[in-house]
Amino acid sequence: MNHRRFTIFCHSILTKPRKTNGPFSLFNAAYMYTSPRYTNPINKTKTFNNFQRPNTRISPDPNDPSTLMKEDGVSICSELWVESFRNPNTTFNNLTNYLRRFELWVLAYQKVCADELGSYMPKSDVQRSALDDLLALRNAVLDNRFRWGARLEFFIKSPKDKTEYESLSKRKIRAILTTTQPSPFQDRIVQEVLFMILEPVYEGRFSEKSYAFRPGRTAHTALRVIRRSFAGYLWYIKGDLSTVLDGLKVGMVVSALMRDVRDKMVIDLVKSAMTTPVITSPPVEKKRTKRKYQKKRVLAEDEPKPDPYWLESFFGFAPEEAEKVPTWGHCGILSPLLANICLDELDRWMEGKMKEFYKPSKSDVIWNSPEGEVDQGNTSWPEFVPTSGPDKTRKIDYIRFGGHFLIGVRGPRADAAILRKQLIEFCDEKYMLKLDNESLPIEHITKGIMFLDHVLCRRVVYPTLRYTATGGKIISEKGVGTLLSVTASLKQCIKQFRKLGFLKGDRDPDPQPCFRMFHATQAHTNAQMNKLLTTMVEWYRYADNRKKIVNFCSYIIRGSLAKLYAAKYKLRSRAKVYKIGDRTLRRPLKEKKGLSPEYNDLLRQGLSESIEGLHYTRMSLVPETDYSPFPVGWKPDHEKALLEYIRLDDPKTKEEIHTNLTEEGLISPQDYVSMLVWNYKRNAAINGVNSSEEDKTLLLGSSIQNDEQTLEDDEGHEEQLHASNV
């Protein structure tokens, strides 16, 4: 029947042509006529009337993903970073505009896919169906239809999720709804979008005293700050607020968030992520059963590879302060940021106490100015504190890494006790944490302060101080003072090795065979352990005993591998292994090839593959401690770039640069005028304003008119000189 209608309609169109100037061609008309929507007799008159209407320009579809991607997502994030750092005290009332930007959702999809698939997905490789689903997810979030922790109904699924949820059995559906499941793919996309919006807002106003869960502020940065700024402090208060990382009341988090963000949609999304219950399966006691043979599992093509053994081992060396990462409800990657937002109030309170406790003394050799300068003593050797008289400057300093903080007090112990009492009251009032004197001990520097698996201690030294006196005479004097030492804790290192199963015993640690690498080749095993040793060398980069601690790690790992190879190749002892494979285990141990002269000849000729030996088997091979001075007022590289861009983008700075260039003769008045005109046109194009010559004259004012008049006078003067010469 439809074919007959199509034939009759085409015959009528061909015999009685109509004027159709526009997108309604013959084939479009035929499609509309044969469509079920238009085969109803009631709509036939309406259909033919549509053909007789004049053509109108079709506006872009707001639900088409291709029309919504106008800019790059990275450039939008950069604009938000610049705006936040330019006005760090501004309250953001309308972040929903950024939540509507589809470019941010595409960027979040790319980042989550990189974590899911193990490889970066360019924007050109994102399929159209994925863009449509991503647009549906964005609209659901904006329309308040999105629900955290969905198990069966998704707006968008992972590219590697091939499950057909409509055809699942009741048993599988019940298992999905009642057991612990990984975070849904769409939840991670929403978390990523919120993180890209909220992180620049708060990074511009966070305290410089916090060094965890922030870009560019690592544990190494905290150790360098301690070495630089904590020299001269006698009493230390070490606190643990890691219970905050386990979770706070939703009202506290929302109130801390609303200090700087007043956008209702963003606040509601974060609040619902924290209040939506997380379904977890009840703990089940594992029964001891015989270990069955497990077939080696082959990874799929799009499945990311698991972390290698050396990386898992290095993560096991994480210090206590960096071991716990907060996970609040369905917040995911937002949890560390929210924890820093809540703990930022403690940082601000401590900054006020630092100003309150500062009492300078003129008889002290450091910090004797009323402004409280940062530099103290010898700026090229900040760890050294010269000996001063009995009347010392009273001062405190503070640093926080995650849920742990360290306070240094220079002065009597009574000042530390007063500060501890006030700190207990503040934590009880703000975070509802019941702290006591035992949880906040006051320790003297001579006992050694443990922080980030490094020990802070003080040594009395008698250096020879050389300085240039008046007249250029170099004077050498014998000085006395104390030196702040930051050493790696050997006790903590042994504890971490024991936890990973590399050794046993405390006083005389005995290496244990690393059976995790039993089925790997000798070359692969040595390469894995060399990567672990390289990361250990980098971790202890700023420790005073770097050579000693790395040499101990190399001894443990080398002994563990020697026992493994002795058991694997049936060599009975470590001595036999070292005799065949050398002390670096670089010679092949299989079938005792390392002792054969034929192997040496083949290795010399390049006909045999060499095995990489273990690194740092001797203390002389370990690099020296990095004592490079930490600059005053240090900032991460990305913050430096942002502040420099804001400074150069300031109109006053531009005017100063133009003035200096004009005064030095590096730019002519004509170029200066053209530059101003070009800047005006660019700003007008960005703001969507049509620039005309009259608007240009009104905007630039008399300066451009005067410059143009000067140019005309100069041209007329040149013509007169030329005429007189003729």
Image (tube, grey):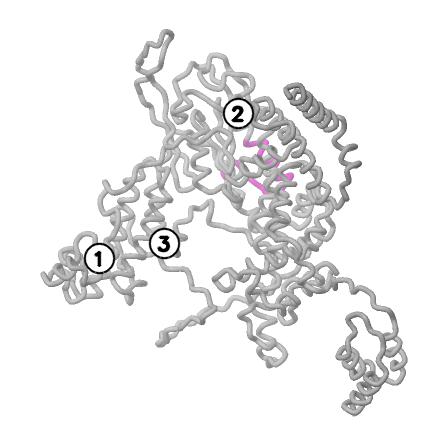
Q: At 73% from the left edge and 44% from the top edge, which residue is drawn?
A: 687
Q: Position of residue 39 (x, y in %)?
A: 83, 84
Using the image, determine if residue 722 lies above or below residue 304: above
Query: SS at mark 3?
Result: helix
Query: SS at mark 2?
Result: helix
Question: Which of the two marks, 1 or 3, is nearer to us in this view?
Answer: 1
Residue 499's tag is: 3
Q: Which of marks 1 and 2 is nearer the N terminus?
A: 2
Q: Position of residue 338 (x, y in %)?
A: 61, 48
Residue 432 makes an appearance in the image: no
Query: SS at mark 1?
Result: helix
Q: Where is residue 539 in the image (x, y as percent from the top left)?
A: 38, 44
| Disc 1 to disc 2, C-alpha distance | 54 Å
Question: Which of the two marks, 3 or 2, is nearer to us in this view?
Answer: 3
Using the image, determine if residue 506 lies above or below residue 344: below
| Magenta stretch bounds | 420-439
| Kind of residue at badge 3 | Lys
Residue pointed to by mark 1: 562
| Kind of residue at badge 1 | Ala
Question: Which of the two marks, 1 or 2, is nearer to us in this view?
Answer: 1
Left or right: residue 275 versus residue 230 is: right
